[in-house]
Image: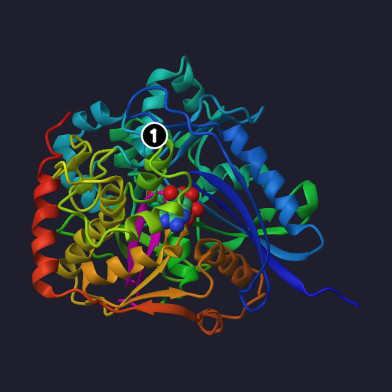
C-alpha cells in the first residue's frame, strides 16, 4: 500500500529543538525534541553553541520522520540569534549570540542619533534584541573576523539561515527573519546599504533574502535526504501563520520563554508610535508580503523556569499552577521580570527585574501567582499599545505555546485583558506554520483557505473579574514597572 505523504517542520527554539510531522489535515503524527545548553558567560550575556544546535536538529529530524514519507520540510526558529561561520569548514567562529543578550548596548549608543531614521527604514527601535548589532560585536571582538568577512570567507545567518545552509548548502534567509536584523529595508525587502554602512557589516557575509514559502534547496543526508526544504519563518511569524491569522486585524500571542503578540496589518507596514515593532508577517512565493505589528515581551515562561532553577520554588514548570491557585490573589506582590531590560512597549535596556510589594504576609504561593500574573500584565501593556496604534481592536486573543497548558494563566489573561482568550486544538502552531509554508511551496496544500479550514478551538475563557479590581491591580503593576527603570 502506498504511504500517505506528510510534511515535517523543525522548530529550533531558545531552549530546545523539535521536529514535528503533520498529516494533510494539520494533525500531529510524530514529535521529537532535545534541549540544548544555555550559556551565561557574564551577567546579561546569553550564548548557544550553534554546532550543538545543528547536531540536535539532525537528531530530532531523523527521530521524528522515521517511517514517514515526507513531501517537504519547513523551518521555524528563535529569531535574532546570530551565528557567523566559516564558509569552507562550516565551523562557527564563536558561540551564537542569543536574542536575550544585552552586550551590544555600547554599540547602540554610537547609533543613537540615527534612531528615528533606522526605525523608519526597519520598523524597529534600536535595541540589543536584534541581530545586526550582534554581528557588529563579533566583527569587533573576534580576531581577524572583519577581514575574513570582507573577503566573504565567513557567513552570517540567523538560525534559519544556519540550518538551511547545513541542510542544503544554500546561503539564504527568509524575509521574516531578515526583518529582525536592523539591516533590512521593510519596503524593498532587501538589505539597506545605508544601514550596512552604519552598522559596519560587510555585504559579502550576508545571505540572500527570500520569501517564507518557496523551495530553497534539497536536504542532504539523514532520513530527509532528497526532501525539499521549502519554507522558513521566524517562530513568532510562524505561529501567526499556523493560527491562520491571514486577515488584517487577526492576531495571536505565543507564550514560551518570552511572549510575542502579533497582529496582521495587511499589505502596508504600520509604523508604531507606541513601542511596537513593525515586522514582516509572511510572504508566500513572490506574492505581496503581509506585515504585522508585534509586541515582544522578553521574559514570561523564563520567569517560571527561574523560579524552578534559580529559586527552587517549584520542582517543575507545571507545579506553578497548583501553587498559584492555592491563594486567591497575589497578596499585593508584583514581579516585573526585566532580566534583559524591558522590551515592548518600553524598550528600556537600563531596567532590571524587581519583586515589589513584599510584606511578612507574602508566601511562595503569592510569588508564584505574581509570576503568572506578570505574563498577563505584560500582555496588557502590548494590547493597549496595539489599540493605540491601529483602528482594528482585537476582539479576542488566540494563544499558543508551552505556557498555555496553564488554565489559571489563561483565565488571568482574560481577566486582565478584559477579552475572550481562545486556545486552538493544535497548540504547536509554530511548527504548524512552518509546515504550512513548506506544504504550500510544494503544492501539498493548495492555498490559504485550505489551511484556514484546519483551525479548531479547544477551549476559551471569558473575563470574570470586576472592573474596579482590574484597574486597581493594573495601577499597582504600572507602579512596579516604574521601579525597574534606571537600574543599570
Ligand atoms: N504549566 C506551565 N505553567 C507555566 N509555564 C509553563 C508551564 N509549562 C511550561 N511552562 C513554561 O513554558 C516555557 C516553554 O514553552 P515553549 O513553548 O516550549 O518555549 P520555547 O519555544 O520558548 O522554548 C518554559 O519557559 C516554561 O517555564
Ligand atoms: O524560541 P522562543 O519561542 O523563545 O522565541 C524566541 C523569539 O523568536 C525571539 O524573538
| Residue numbers of the magenta segment | 247-268
Q: Residue lying furthest top in this view?
A: 143
Which residue sits at x=26%, y=28%? Answer: 107
Q: Is residue 106 on the magenta stretch?
A: no
Which residue sits at x=47%, y=21%? Answer: 145
Specify whether 447 is left or right of 111.
right
Specify whether 347 is left or right of 89.
left
Q: Quadrant of residue 268?
A: bottom left
Where is residue 180 drawn, in percent x and y?
37, 49
Tell me the quarter of the image containing the N terminus: bottom right
Q: Which residue is mark 1?
A: 310
Q: Is residue 177 visible?
A: no
Q: Nearer the viewer, residue 241 or 394?
A: 394
Where is residue 392 drawn, in percent x and y?
23, 77
What is the secondary structure assignment of the residue under circle 1?
Answer: loop
Near mark 1 (Cα within 10 A), the count class, few <14, some 14-19 or many ≥20, is few
Q: Residue lying furthest right in this view?
A: 1
Amino acid at each position: 500500500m502506498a504511504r500517505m505523504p506528510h510534511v515535517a517542520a523543525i522548530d529550533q527554539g531558545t531552549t530546545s529543538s523539535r521536529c514535528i510531522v503533520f498529516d494533510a489535515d494539520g494533525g500531529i503524527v510524530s514529535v521529537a525534541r532535545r534541549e540544548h545548553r544555555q550559556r551565561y558567560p557574564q551577567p546579561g550575556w546569553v550564548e548557544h553553541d550553534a554546532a550543538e544546535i545543528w547536531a540536535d536538529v539532525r537528531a530530532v529530524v531523523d527521530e521524528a520522520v522515521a517511517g514517514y514519507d515526507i513531501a517537504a520540510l519547513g523551518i521555524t526558529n528563535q529569531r535574532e540569534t546570530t551565528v557567523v561561520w566559516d564558509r569552507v569548514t562550516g565551523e562557527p567562529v564563536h558561540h551564537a549570540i542569543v536574542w536575550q543578550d544585552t552586550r551590544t548596548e555600547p554599540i547602540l549608543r554610537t547609533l543613537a542619533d540615527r534612531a528615528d531614521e533606522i526605525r523608519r527604514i526597519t520598523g524597529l527601535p534600536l535595541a540589543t534584541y536584534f541581530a545586526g548589532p550582534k554581528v557588529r560585536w563579533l566583527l569587533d571582538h573576534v580576531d581577524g573576523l572583519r577581514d575574513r568577512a570582507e573577503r566573504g570567507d565567513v557567513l552570517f545567518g540567523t538560525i534559519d539561515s544556519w540550518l538551511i545552509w547545513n541542510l542544503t548548502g544554500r546561503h539564504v534567509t527568509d524575509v521574516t527573519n531578515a526583518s529582525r536584523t536592523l539591516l533590512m529595508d521593510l519596503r524593498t525587502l532587501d538589505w539597506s546599504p545605508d544601514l550596512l554602512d552604519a552598522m559596519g557589516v560587510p555585504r559579502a557575509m550576508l545571505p540572500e533574502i527570500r520569501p517564507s514559502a518557496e523551495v530553497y534547496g534539497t536536504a542532504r543526508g539523514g532520513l530527509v535526504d532528497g526532501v525539499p526544504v521549502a519554507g522558513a519563518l521566524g517562530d513568532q511569524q510562524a505561529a501567526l501563520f499556523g493560527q491562520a491569522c491571514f486577515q488584517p486585524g487577526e492576531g495571536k500571542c505565543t507564550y514560551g520563554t518570552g511572549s510575542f503578540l502579533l497582529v496582521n496589518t495587511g499589505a502596508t507596514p504600520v509604523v508604531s508610535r507606541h513601542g511596537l515593532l513593525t515586522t514582516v508577517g509572511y510572504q508566500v512565493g513572490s506574492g505581496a508580503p503581509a506585515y504585522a505589528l508585534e509586541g515582544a515581551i522578553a521574559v514570561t515562561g523564563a520567569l517560571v523556569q527561574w523560579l524552578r532553577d534559580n529559586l527552587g520554588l517549584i520542582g517543575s514548570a507545571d507545579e506553578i499552577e497548583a501553587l498559584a491557585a492555592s491563594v486567591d490573589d497575589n497578596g499585593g506582590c508584583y514581579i516585573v521580570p526585566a532580566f534583559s531590560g524591558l522590551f515592548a512597549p518600553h524598550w528600556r535596556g537600563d531596567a532590571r527585574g524587581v519583586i515589589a510589594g513584599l510584606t511578612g504576609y507574602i508566601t511562595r504561593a503569592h510569588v508564584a501567582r505574581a509570576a503568572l500574573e506578570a505574563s498577563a500584565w505584560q500582555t496588557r501593556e502590548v494590547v493597549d499599545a496595539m489599540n493605540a496604534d491601529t483602528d482594528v481592536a482585537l476582539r479576542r486573543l488566540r494563544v499558543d505555546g508551552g505556557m498555555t497548558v496553564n488554565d489559571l494563566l489563561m483565565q488571568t489573561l482574560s481577566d486582565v485583558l478584559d477579552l475572550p482568550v481562545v486556545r486552538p486544538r493544535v497548540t504547536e502552531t509554530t511548527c504548524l506554520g512552518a509546515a504550512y509554508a513548506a506544504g504550500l511551496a510544494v503544492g501539498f496544500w493548495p492555498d490559504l483557505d485550505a489551511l484556514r479550514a484546519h483551525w479548531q478551538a479547544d477551549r476559551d475563557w471569558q473575563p470574570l473579574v470586576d472592573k474596579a479590581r482590574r484597574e486597581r491591580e493594573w495601577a499597582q503593576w504600572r507602579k512596579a514597572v516604574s521601579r525597574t527603570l534606571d537600574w543599570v
